[in-house]
Image (spheres, rainbow, N blue to C red):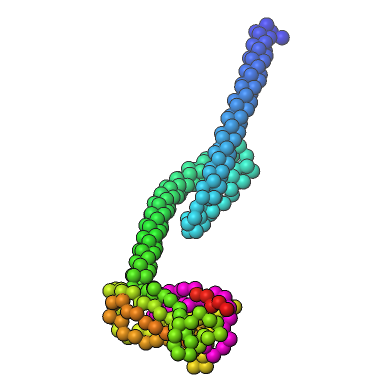
Amino acid sequence: MKKSTLAVLIILLIAVAGLAVYLFLDNRQTKADMQEMVEQMTFEKEELQDEYEELALQFDGYGKNINNDSLAEKLAIEQQRVQDLLEELRITKATNARRIAELKKELATVRAVMVEYVHQIDSLDRTNKRLTAENIEVKQQYQQVQEKATQLEEEKTRLTEVVTRASMMEVARFSMTQLDSRDKATKRYSKIQKLRFDFAVLKNITTEAGNKTVYLRIVRPDGEVMLKQNSGTFRYENRNIDYSLKKDFEYAGEEISLTLYWTVEEILQIGTYNADFFIDGNLVGSFPFRIEK
């Protein structure tokens, strides 16, 4: 073999060896670059997944504070959309750059929708707080009006009671005298034939003048009311009660003296009696007296 041919072969072998070394080194660099690219894409996928998970939590948090059914329904739809996209992202390979990019755009769209819903939620919250404050104010005003009305009603009742008491007639200067058969005063029990009750209806210019009736209830020591066969009843505190004696008289607002007689037809009990006087449905005087043996 010629020396020139051998030299060419040696040069070719060196060139091939150099090319092989270059290709080997270039392949290693390419693998390293590919590995770095995959790691970068995996990192970006993980970041995107974290953002989706954070957005899902935000949707869940806002969903618990909504009292508007329509808005709550819309928010629930977007929340489910985020969950579906998150599940898809989890199963999507990091090297699927196209789908990863699409999911990133979807994230931006959903986030924009959530921002809009947050604004609506805040607006509703402010409105609810304002309405709640107004409602509290209205309730307070209503309560104040009710309290004022109650006070006025109580004042009216009090004034009515004052007027009623002021216009009530009053019996005073009561005395009971035991009479014998000749209408003479007697202290002897065995001689008593009548009981005379003297009393005065006092002056009261606030009482309406006109014909009046005074009712007398004579209450025995045993608590029973003394009655005659022709005794009747009168109205007192929404019920009818018995009376012992009554007398009609004309009242003009000035003091007037009256007398009532009880004819004794029974055995009188020994002890303390009570004489209760009523006019216009009111108890206007109550006086104790005794009968001794």
Specify the quadrant of the image occupied by residue 37: top right
Where is residue 190 shown, x and y percent of the image? Answer: 56, 85
Q: Residue 108: within the magenta? A: no
Q: Where residue 266 sits in the image (x, y, percent)?
A: 56, 88
Residue at 48% in and 90% down: 181
Viewer can see residue 202: yes
Residue 142 visible in image:
no
Position in image of residue 290 (x %, y %) = 52, 75
Comparing 90 with 122, the one in front is 122
Q: Is residue 293 above or below residue 1?
A: below
Main SS of residues in magenta: strand
Quadrant that contains the C terminus: bottom right
Camera-side residue of 143 and 16: 143
Q: Split into 4 quadrants, where in the image is the N terminus?
A: top right
User: Is residue 268 one of those drawn in magenta?
Assistant: yes
Q: Position of residue 104 (x, y in %)?
A: 52, 41
Which quarter of the picture shows residue 54?
Answer: top right
Q: Residue placed at 44% from the left, 85% from the top? A: 184
* Left or right: 231, with 149 as reference point: right
Q: Residue furthest right?
A: 1
* Number of numbered discs on residues: 0
The magenta stretch is 264-288
